[in-house]
Amino acid sequence: MRKITLAFLLMSLSLVAFAQKSDQGYAGVYMTKENFINNRLSYKINTADKGDKLKFIPIADWTLTIRIVTPDSVQTFKRGTIYGYYENGKVYRYAPPGNLYAAEDYYRVEDDRGLVIYTSEFNGGSEYYYSTDLTAPIQLLNLKNIKRDFKSQPQFVSAVKRLNKKEVHGELAKRDSQGNFIINKIYTQSVRK
């Protein structure tokens, strides 16, 4: 009886490990804000399957169109029709036009363990952006915006000023030796106590 139980346990563990590894090859779109927040893809494909692809139309034509291609269908998602997309472990959030703080684009979520930190390879080169949560407006990560958004949190603003002591572009996006954003450590300690 013990041998059967042990064999079943080992088989179960190998299936779990396989499922975790294969999840890295998935791509899809989040149709709604709720799906995005809860990490539930509305349309999902396995990019390891022959013919399954997520295509982001080149930024040069500025259509911001996403296509999910399978051997028997093509789903087209024009800008503004989805909240974001997922591709091989990376999550992107759409920012609509008319946003005062960030240009229309899909912003890659770099960290969401405090402030949500984003990058945009198309609009900002190496610039970093943030939002206070996954639904708040995306804006440039700079001292001016932090002061405005957290004027009621002087301890946080003061610590961020020390982090940005050189006032050099990108200072607020510094990472520690483990690769974590320092600003999110400060945020967790001073704002989200």
Image: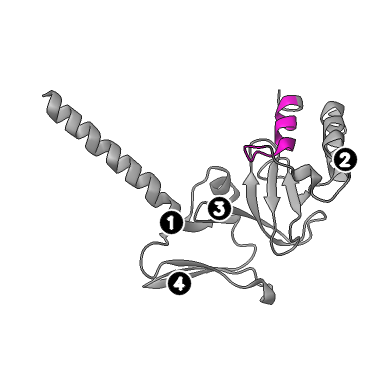
Residue 188 highlighted magenta (yes or no): yes
Which of pointers 3 and 4 indicates the residue nearer the eye? 3
Nearer the observer: mark 2 or 3; the answer is 3
Could you tell me the amino acid type at mark 1? Answer: Gly
Whichever of callouts 2 and 3 sits on the residue coming sooner in the sequence is 3
The answer to which quarter of the image holds residue 5 is top left
Q: Which numbered disc flags the more N-terminal residue, 2 or 1?
A: 1
Q: Which residue is tagged 4?
A: 74
**Where are the magenta residues, as a range?**
177-189
**Is 137 contained in the magenta span?**
no
At horizontal 88% and vertical 43% (from top left) the residue drawn is 166
What is the secondary structure assignment of the residue under circle 2?
helix
**Horizontal relation, residue 61 to residue 171: left or right:** left
Q: Position of residue 65 (x, y in %)?
A: 60, 69
Pointer 2: what residue? 148
Q: Earlier in the sequence, mark 3 or mark 4?
A: 4
- Check disc 1 and report the residue beneath it: 25
